[in-house]
Image (cartoon, rainbow, N blue to C red):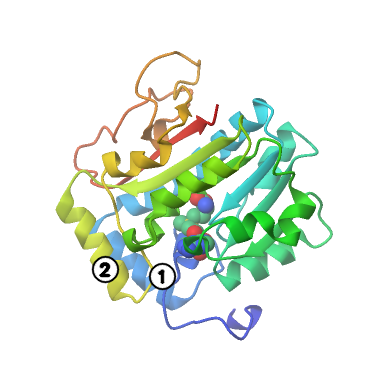
């Protein structure tokens, strides 16, 4: 399988994109990624569940934003192509929807461009968003695909925990949301734990693999991304009730009431998620 990858890919260090691909049941990963995931899963089996729940959250959130009139998406930390990609989800609701995928992993860009060959309404841009998003917003590909004077669906789904505090991830989100047009949506999830030991263990393990990583944060810390934005209802019937930022498995799920953490208290790690609007 290695010959399907560009020659400059690091096959010795686990990559978040390939580890996530493995957890989702994909084939674009190496033994080093699978071994790293197996170390995590042996201690925290919820890693597998939260990956699938996060991907389902992404789909529901994109469908929701598209149903509210959002027809252009900036998918930051897009990940490897999978079964139902953002442009495919958005275009089911809004056939002319456009999506710019951004990632800093060269495998994501190579596979993404292959997926899109001959397709329409989507593009892949290689960029490190810890360096700020100004260069993303002004890149020629962005200008071709997106009209940044109109509302965007800004997606930071399961990626901000990859950014260390030293790169000021929440300041980056705040500057980005200041820069986009009123009416823009933020679609967001972040791996969290309410157990500091679990959070520290995961972060130490990821760093011990040599994988670029930020940290597992608490739900309260992760909530900083919503600063200054209006969170939409997490209820699938649009009820005007708390909580609005929730375990991703329960966000606007028709059969699961919104909940701040997984009901099973032995589960220590989950994706804190929500959708908010810039007024
Ligand atoms: C866990 S995956 C999430 C993929 C997708 N957003 C989802 O939720 O299904 C995180 C992605 O963020 C990307 N990523 C991590 N740090 C990044 C950075 N500094 N700039 C751009 N992308 C980054 C990784 O390469 C990976 O593809």
Along the line of sight, the residue nearer the viewer: 57 or 223: 223
> Within 10 angstroms of label 1, few (less than 14), some, or many (20 or more) residues?
some
Query: Can the viewer see residue 81?
Result: no
> What is the quadrant of residue 239 in the picture?
top left
Q: Secondary structure at mark 1?
A: helix
Image vertical order of residue 74 relative to residue 261, above or below:
below
Image vertical order of residue 135 relative to residue 245, above or below:
below
* Disc 1 Cβ-to-ligand 1 distance below 8 Å: no
Q: Quadrant of the C terminus?
A: top right
> Within 10 angstroms of label 2, few (less than 14), some, or many (20 or more) residues?
some
* Disc 2 Cβ-to-ligand 1 distance below 8 Å: no
On the image, numbered disc 2 is attached to which residue?
205
On the image, numbered disc 1 is attached to which residue?
34
Residue 273 image offset from top left, x and y in percent: 41, 38
Cα distance between the residues tagged 1 and 2: 14 Å
Q: Residue at x 66, y 35 (%)?
A: 151
Q: Residue at x 39, y 61 (%)?
A: 167
| Residue 36 falls left or right of residue 124 | left
Image vertical order of residue 252 relative to residue 248, above or below:
above
| Residue 130 falls left or right of residue 142 | left
Residue 70 image offset from top left, x and y in percent: 67, 33
Q: Residue at x 30, y 71 (%)?
A: 207
Q: Which residue is the extreme one toward the bottom?
A: 7
Mark identifier at residue 12: none
Residue 248 image offset from top left, x and y in percent: 41, 37
Q: Residue at x 35, y 20 (%)?
A: 242
Q: Secondary structure at mark 2?
A: helix
Residues at discs 1 and 2 in contact (Cβ within 8 Å): no
Query: Can the viewer see residue 161?
Result: yes
């Amino acid at each position: 399988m290695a010959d399907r990858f560009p020659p400059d890919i690091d096959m010795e260090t686990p990559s978040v994109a390939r580890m996530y691909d493995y957890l989702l049941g994909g084939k674009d990963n190496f033994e080093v990624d699978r071994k790293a995931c197996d170390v995590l899963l042996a201690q925290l089996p919820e890693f597998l569940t939260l990956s699938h729940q996060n991907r389902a959250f992404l789909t529901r959130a994109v469908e929701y934003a598209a149903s509210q009139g959002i027809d252009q998406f900036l998918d930051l930390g897009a990940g490897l192509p999978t079964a139902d990609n953002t442009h495919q989800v958005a275009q089911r609701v809004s056939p002319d929807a456009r999506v710019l995928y951004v990632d800093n992993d060269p495998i994501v860009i190579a596979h993404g461009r292959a997926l899109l060959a001959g397709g329409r309404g989507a593009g892949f841009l290689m960029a490190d968003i810890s360096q700020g998003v100004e260069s993303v917003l002004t890149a020629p590909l962005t200008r071709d695909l997106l009209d940044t004077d109109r509302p965007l669906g800004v997606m930071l789904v399961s990626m901000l925990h990859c950014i260390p505090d030293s790169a000021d991830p929440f300041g980056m989100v705040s500057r980005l949301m200041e820069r986009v047009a009123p009416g823009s949506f933020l679609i967001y999830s972040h791996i969290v734990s309410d157990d500091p030991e679990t959070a520290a263990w995961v972060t130490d393990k990821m760093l011990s693999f040599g994988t670029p990583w930020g940290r597992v944060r608490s739900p309260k810390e992760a909530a900083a991304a919503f600063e200054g934005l209006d969170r939409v209802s997490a209820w699938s019937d649009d009820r005007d009730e708390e909580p609005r930022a929730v375990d991703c498995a329960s966000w606007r799920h028709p059969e699961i009431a919104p909940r701040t953490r997984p009901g099973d208290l032995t589960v220590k790690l989950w994706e804190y998620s929500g959708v908010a609007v810039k007024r």
